[in-house]
Image: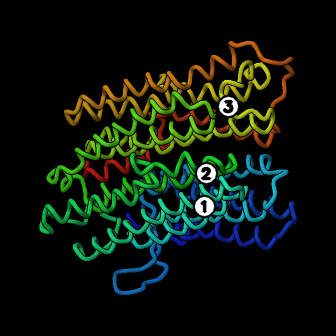
Amino acid sequence: MEVVDARVALAPAISLLCGALVFAAADNTFWRRFWSVSAALAKLGIVMSMLPGSLRGVVYTFDLVEFTPGVGLAFRADALGMFFSVVSSTLWLFTTVYAIGYMEREPNRRRFFGFFALCVSTTVGVAFAENLLTMFLFYETLTICTYPLVIHDETPEAMRAGRTYLVYTLTGGAFVLLGSIWTYQLAGTMTLSQPGILSMEAGRTTLTALFVCLIAGFGVKAAIMPLHGWLPTAMVAPTPVSALLHAVAVVKVGAFGVLRTIYNVFGVELLRELGVCDWLAALAAVTIVTASIIAIFQDNFKRRLAFSTISQLSYIVLGAALLSPLAATAAIVHIANQAFAKITMFFVAGSIQRTTGKTTIHELAGIGYRMPYTMGAFTVAALSFIGIPLFAGFVTKWYLSLGALESDRWIYALVMLGSALLNAAYWLPIVYTAFFKAPHEEVVVQEAHWTMLGPTLACAAYVLLLGMTVSVPGMPFALAQAAVTFVFGM
C-alpha cells in the first residue's frame, strides 16, 4: 500500500536545515552543538516514526517537483530504502556525539559540522530516491559535500587525497548520469519503484553495456577493485570523517546504488537471462580475498580498517550478484552489520589516537589494560567480522553461504570461509597485542572522554543486538526480508 507522506522528504531536509543553521552559528560552540544533536535526534525520530508502517508493508511517497513529464524530484520509502535510512540515521546520532568530543580542539569546526550534516542529508536522500535522477542528484551532492571533510586538515597530503577522491567519485558520477539517461531512453522511465524496468527487447549487448556503466558508476564509491584507490588515500581525514566514509555515507551509498541497479533497474529475472552477474560475483569475491590479504600487512590502524572496508563492502555486492533470496537477505542486512561493527572500530582508533597519540598497531601493546572498555568494544566488532555466532557478522556469513548453495555456486561459500580466516588473521593479532602483550609504559586506566566512549560502546552493543535478534519481530532484519519478498515476488 502506498501513502503520500511529507515525512519521506522531511527526513533529508532536516539535515539540510541543520547544515544551514550550523553555518549560521559561526563560531558559537553551544549553538553548533545544539543544532547538530537536535537535528540528529529529529531525523532519527522522523525515520523511526515511519518504521511501524514500513513493517506492515506501507510505502511512503512524496513528489516534490516535476521537471518534465515523468521526470522529477520524488521520494519513496520502500523497505530497502527504510532499512538504509534507519541505519544511517542511527549512526549519524552516534557519530555526531563522537565528533563533538573528537573535534573539540580542531580548527574549522563550523565547516566540519556544517558539511557533516549535509552529507547525511544527501545519504538519506539517496535512500529515499524514487527514481534514478533523484538518486543521481543526491549521489553527486554527497561527493561535493564530502570533499571539504576529506581535506579538513589542509595539509599537502590531505589536499592530494582530496584531488584523488574527486577524480574517482566525479568520474563514477558521470557513469551514473550516463546510465540513468540511457535507462530512460530504453525504458521510458527512471523509477525505482518496480522490481526491474528494463526488458530483453533492448538487446543483450546494449543491456550488458548499460549494466557495466551503472555498476562502474556506483562501484567507485562501493570501492570494488580496481575502483578502490581513493579510499585508503582518504584516511588522512579526521576519524569522524573516516567513520562517515566507511559506515554512514559514501561507501554505503555506492553499495546501495549497486543494489538498486540489480533489483530495481534490471530485475532478477532479466539478469539471470543476461548472465552478467556471474562476472560481478567473481569480481566481488576477488575483492573480498585480495583486500583482506592486503589488510594483513598494514601496520597503520586506519589503513588496515580501510582495506577491511573494501573487503566487507563486496559482501554486499556478492550477495546481490548471486540473485538468490537468501543471498539478497545477506546483502541487505550487511549494510547494518558492517556499518555498526566498522564504525565501532573507527571510534576505537580515534579514541586511541586522541588519548595516547598512537596510530600504528605495533604501538598498541597493553592498550587493553589502559583502555579496557574501548578495546572490549573493538573485540566485539572483531569477532563480528570473523563471523562468530551471536555477533552480527555471523548472520551475514550464514545467509550468504546459504545463498551461494541455493544458487548452486558453492565456491562462494568457500570464499566466506576463507574470508573468516583472513579476518581472524588481521583482527585477532590486535586483540592479542592489546590484552596479552606487556605494555611499554606504566599502566594507568585512561579511557577517552564520555562523548567518544559512549558512542563506541553503544555501537558495539548494536553489533550484539543485530546478531541476536534476527527472529525478533519488528527488528531491522524484518525490513530486509520485506525488501527481498518484493524483489523476488515471494
Q: Quadrant of the N terminus?
A: bottom left
Task: Locate residue 65, reporting x and y percent.
Answer: 47, 82
Res 404 seen here: yes
Q: In screen coordinates, is 46 left or right of 18?
A: left
Q: Are marks 3 and 1 in contact (CB under 8 Å)?
A: no
Mark 3 belongs to which amino acid?
Thr
366 to 215, vertically: above or below: above
Q: CA distance from mark 1 to mark 2?
A: 9 Å
Dot 2 falls on a residue whose secondary structure is: helix
Q: Residue at x 68, y 12 (%)?
A: 436
Q: Are marks 1 and 2 in contact (CB under 8 Å)?
A: yes
Is 79 or 228 nearer to us in this picture? 228
Mark 1 belongs to which amino acid?
Thr
348 to 489, vertically: above or below: above
Task: Locate residue 464, reporting x and y percent.
Answer: 57, 30
Q: Which mark is residue 328?
A: none
Residue hosting label 3: 360
Task: Locate residue 105, reporting x and y percent.
Answer: 85, 51
Q: Residues within 10 Å of mark 2 (few under 14, many from 20)?
A: many
Instruction: Report the number of numbered marks.
Output: 3
Q: Residue at x 37, y 54 (%)?
A: 258
Residue hosting label 1: 146
Question: Dividing the picture into quarters, in which one does residue 305 lie?
Answer: top right
Is 7 or 81 nearer to us in this picture? 81
Residue hosting label 2: 244
Front of the two marks 3 and 1: 3
